[in-house]
Image (cartoon, grey):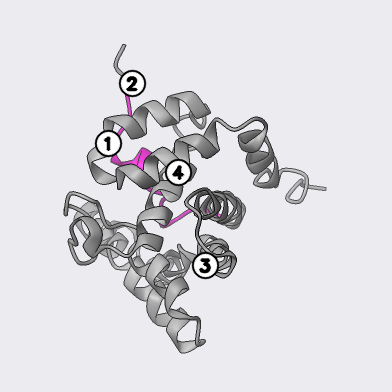
Amino acid sequence: MAISYGRTDIETPIHADIKETISHGIIVSNLAYLVGKELGLQEEVCYDLAVAGMLHDLGKVRLNFYMNEKVEDEILAVDETRYMRMHPSIGYAILADYDYNQTVLDAVLYHHEHYDGTGYPHNLVGKQIPLVGRIMHVCDIFGALISNRDYREGFDVETALDIMIDEVKNFDMKVFLAFQRVAFSDGVMETVMEKGNLDELFEEE
């Protein structure tokens, strides 16, 4: 049976609250580190992937402040899409001002580039996309799929992976296969998702 999903399911929204933003960052950070290790990357690169995972959506935080200052009726769907596509470049610029290294910057800037050239911000194709960007892209999509939305519960791991297979043209196959090996390792996903569960931290008194 076909799985019903849309573009908003594989993209975290600009207006995500702080709990969702931090939770998503934790999940992507842990997964990116593990995929880097699975691919045999050096420890310092894996560490940089973990840092980038926490910070990859920083541009959305800046955009959220901007959009909250505008009257809701003034923001058309086309404008929100245009703003959404700006967030990797905005995040890159912020982090460059704070002297983050090029590995972190590349992972943030290129985490929405698709392997088939249909991504953003630069429509890069295949290995034009730095490896860390290709890794971050896979982990970010998975993190978005397992997140709760106002209109649905987060997809389970198996369903999320099935959806990603539908979108496999967007991924570097070597990276995607490494991600699958991580995803199906005993206890890995349970640990990663537990780390990203901030319900107790944000529990109302």
Q: In which quarter of the image is residue 81?
A: bottom left
Q: Reading the chain from its start, which is encountered first: label 3 or label 4?
A: 3
Q: Are marks 1 and 2 in contact (CB under 8 Å)?
A: no
Mark in the foreground, 4 or 1:
1
- Label 2: element kind: loop
Q: Reading the chain from its start, which is encountered first: label 2 or label 4?
A: 2
Residue at 61%, 36% in the rendered image: 189
Cα separation between marks 1 and 3: 26 Å
Q: In which quarter of the image is residue 92?
A: bottom left
Amino acid type of the residue that numbered disc 3 sits on in the rendered structure: Val
| Near-viewer residue (3 or 69) | 3
**In the image, farthest residue toward the right:** 205
Q: Do the residues labelled 2 and 3 touch (CB within 8 Å)?
A: no
Residue at 76%, 51% in the rendered image: 201
Q: Is residue 188 left or right of residue 97?
A: right
Q: In this view, does 95 lie to the left or right of 84?
A: right
Q: Reading the chain from its start, which is encountered first: label 2 or label 3?
A: 2
Q: Dot 2, how many residues are within 10 Å of its Cα: few (below 14), some (14-19), or many (20+)? A: few
Residue 70 visible, this angle? no
Q: Do the residues labelled 4 and 1 touch (CB within 8 Å)?
A: no
Q: What stretch is highlighted in magenta?
A: 4-17
Q: Reading the chain from its start, which is encountered first: label 1 or label 2?
A: 2
Mark 2 = which residue?
3
Q: Reading the chain from its start, which is encountered first: label 1 or label 3?
A: 3
Numbered circle sitting on residue 144 = 4
Mark in the foreground, 1 or 3:
3
| Near-viewer residue (10 or 40) | 40
Amino acid type of the residue that numbered disc 1 sits on in the rendered structure: Glu
Percent across and percent down for residue 180 are 46, 35
